[in-house]
Image (tube, grey):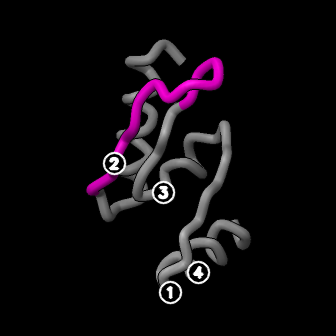
Protein backbone atom coordinates (compact mmCIF):
# COMPACT_ATOMS: atom_id res chain seq x y z
CA UNK A 1 0.00 0.00 0.00
CA UNK A 2 2.84 2.39 0.83
CA UNK A 3 4.43 1.82 -2.57
CA UNK A 4 1.12 2.46 -4.37
CA UNK A 5 0.62 5.64 -2.35
CA UNK A 6 4.14 6.83 -3.27
CA UNK A 7 3.48 6.11 -6.96
CA UNK A 8 0.18 8.00 -6.78
CA UNK A 9 1.93 10.98 -5.17
CA UNK A 10 4.58 10.99 -7.91
CA UNK A 11 1.85 10.80 -10.56
CA UNK A 12 0.07 13.81 -9.05
CA UNK A 13 3.32 15.75 -9.46
CA UNK A 14 3.31 14.96 -13.18
CA UNK A 15 5.42 11.82 -13.34
CA UNK A 16 4.28 9.15 -15.79
CA UNK A 17 3.93 5.77 -14.08
CA UNK A 18 3.99 2.43 -15.89
CA UNK A 19 3.02 -0.49 -13.68
CA UNK A 20 2.62 -4.11 -14.70
CA UNK A 21 0.33 -6.11 -12.43
CA UNK A 22 -2.06 -9.03 -12.30
CA UNK A 23 -3.81 -7.54 -9.27
CA UNK A 24 -7.12 -5.82 -10.12
CA UNK A 25 -6.98 -3.81 -6.89
CA UNK A 26 -3.61 -2.33 -7.90
CA UNK A 27 -4.78 -1.81 -11.48
CA UNK A 28 -7.85 0.05 -10.24
CA UNK A 29 -5.58 2.84 -8.97
CA UNK A 30 -4.68 3.76 -12.56
CA UNK A 31 -6.37 6.29 -14.84
CA UNK A 32 -5.72 4.07 -17.86
CA UNK A 33 -5.41 0.30 -17.97
CA UNK A 34 -4.13 -1.59 -21.01
CA UNK A 35 -5.01 -5.29 -21.07
CA UNK A 36 -2.58 -7.65 -22.79
CA UNK A 37 -3.06 -11.26 -23.83
CA UNK A 38 -0.44 -13.38 -25.62
CA UNK A 39 1.73 -10.30 -26.13
CA UNK A 40 -0.93 -8.16 -27.77
CA UNK A 41 -3.24 -5.40 -26.64
CA UNK A 42 -6.73 -6.79 -26.02
CA UNK A 43 -8.46 -3.67 -24.74
CA UNK A 44 -8.02 -0.44 -22.82
CA UNK A 45 -10.02 0.88 -19.91
CA UNK A 46 -10.02 4.57 -19.09
CA UNK A 47 -11.33 5.25 -15.61
CA UNK A 48 -13.41 8.34 -15.04
CA UNK A 49 -14.26 7.32 -11.47
CA UNK A 50 -12.71 9.32 -8.65
CA UNK A 51 -13.83 6.75 -6.08
CA UNK A 52 -11.41 3.84 -5.63
CA UNK A 53 -14.23 1.35 -5.03
CA UNK A 54 -15.96 2.40 -8.26
CA UNK A 55 -12.68 2.03 -10.17
CA UNK A 56 -12.09 -1.44 -8.73
CA UNK A 57 -15.66 -2.44 -9.60
CA UNK A 58 -15.17 -1.24 -13.20
CA UNK A 59 -11.98 -3.30 -13.48
CA UNK A 60 -13.61 -6.41 -12.02
CA UNK A 61 -16.63 -6.02 -14.32
CA UNK A 62 -14.39 -5.72 -17.37
CA UNK A 63 -12.34 -8.75 -16.32
CA UNK A 64 -15.51 -10.76 -15.77
CA UNK A 65 -16.76 -9.92 -19.26
CA UNK A 66 -13.39 -11.02 -20.67
CA UNK A 67 -13.68 -14.38 -18.93
CA UNK A 68 -11.03 -13.82 -16.27
Residue under pointer 4: 10
Q: Which residue is mark 2?
A: 46
Which quadrant would residue 45 be assigned to in this image?
Answer: top left
- Earlier-in-chain disc, 4 versus 3: 4
Q: Secondary structure at mark 2?
A: strand
Residue that protrudes farthest toward the bottom in the picture: 13
* Position of residue 52 measured from the top left corner of the image (x, y, whole percent): 42, 58
Q: In percent of the image, x 50 and y 58: which residue is there?
A: 29
Is residue 24 or residue 30 the one in the foreground? 30
Give the residue at the far right of this rendering.
3
Residue 21 left/right relative to 10: right
Tell me where the magenta segment starts and ends, as one range. Answer: 36-48
- Tell me how far mark 3 sits from mark 2, CA to CA: 8 Å
Q: Nearer the N terminus, badge 2 or badge 4?
A: 4
Residue indicated by mark 1? 13
- Disc 3: which residue: 30
Query: Rounded to the nearest whole Å, what is the CA distance between mark 4 and mark 1?
Result: 5 Å
Residue at disc 3, secondary structure: loop
Q: Residue furthest top?
A: 67
**Residues at discs 4 and 1 in contact (Cβ within 8 Å):** yes
Quadrant showing the C terminus: top right
Asked whether disc 4 touches disc 3, contact meaning CB atoms under 8 Å apart, the reply is no
Sort mark 2 into few (<14), some (14-19) or many (20+) by Cα contacts within 10 Å. few
Q: Is residue 50 magenta?
A: no
Quick one: label 3 or label 1, which is nearer the N terminus? 1
Q: CA distance from mark 2 to mark 4?
A: 19 Å
Amino acid sequence: QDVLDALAAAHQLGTTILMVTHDPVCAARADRIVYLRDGGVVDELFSSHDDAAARENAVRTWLSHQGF
